[in-house]
Amino acid sequence: MIKKEKKSEIIEKYQKHSNDTGSTAVQIAILSERITEINEHLKKNPKDHHSRRGLLMMVGKRKGLMKYLERTNLDEYRELIADLGIRG
């Protein structure tokens, strides 16, 4: 679970304007943070299959959002993946 302060930091970093909390870039950044946290959890708890399913669902959702961002705003997409280090 992402702490409130960490989530606020992520939103501030990727928002487009002061009230932006749900743009595609913000959603991808929040999902990436949650994926990282669950991945660390699964390294310690390899038999937690419920969390593994949740992780796979989040990865799929992030992938869909990234495809949408790539289609609609290629420059923002490239900047975001470079900043988050999602793809090499």
Image (cartoon, rainbow, N blue to C red):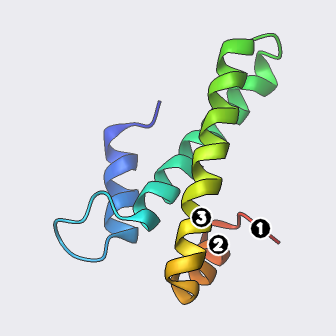
Determine contact: label 2, label 3, CB under 8 Å: yes
- Please tell me whether residue 28 is drawn above or below residue 74 in the rendered image: above
Determine contact: label 2, label 1, CB under 8 Å: yes
2 or 3: tag closer to the N-terminus: 3
The x, y position of residue 74, in whole percent, is 58, 85
What amino acid does circle 1 point to? Arg
Nearer the observer: mark 2 or 3; the answer is 3
Closer to us: 37 or 71: 71
The residue positioned farthest toward the left in the image shown: 19
Closer to us: 13 or 26: 26
Within 10 Å of disc 1 (Cα), the crowding (few <14, some 14-19, many 20+) is few
Image quarter for residue 87?
bottom right
Q: Please give the label number shown on residue 21.
A: none
2 or 1: tag closer to the N-terminus: 2
Q: Please give the label number shown on residue 81.
A: 2
Within 10 Å of disc 3 (Cα), the crowding (few <14, some 14-19, many 20+) is some
What amino acid does circle 2 point to? Ile
Image quarter for residue 19?
bottom left
As measured in the structure, the alpha-carbon distance from the residue carrying label 2 to the one carrying label 3 is 9 Å
- Secondary structure of the residue carrying numbered label 3: helix
- Please tell me whether residue 84 is drawn above or below residue 50 in the rendered image: below
As measured in the structure, the alpha-carbon distance from the residue carrying label 1 to the one carrying label 3 is 11 Å
Q: Where is the C terminus found, in terms of image quarters?
A: bottom right
Within 10 Å of disc 2 (Cα), the crowding (few <14, some 14-19, many 20+) is some
Q: Please give the label number shown on residue 87.
A: 1
Residue depicted at x 54% and y 59%:
65
As measured in the structure, the alpha-carbon distance from the residue carrying label 2 to the one carrying label 1 is 6 Å
The x, y position of residue 17, in whole percent, is 22, 76
What amino acid does circle 3 point to? Met
The x, y position of residue 25, in whole percent, is 45, 67
Give the labeled residue for mark 3: 66
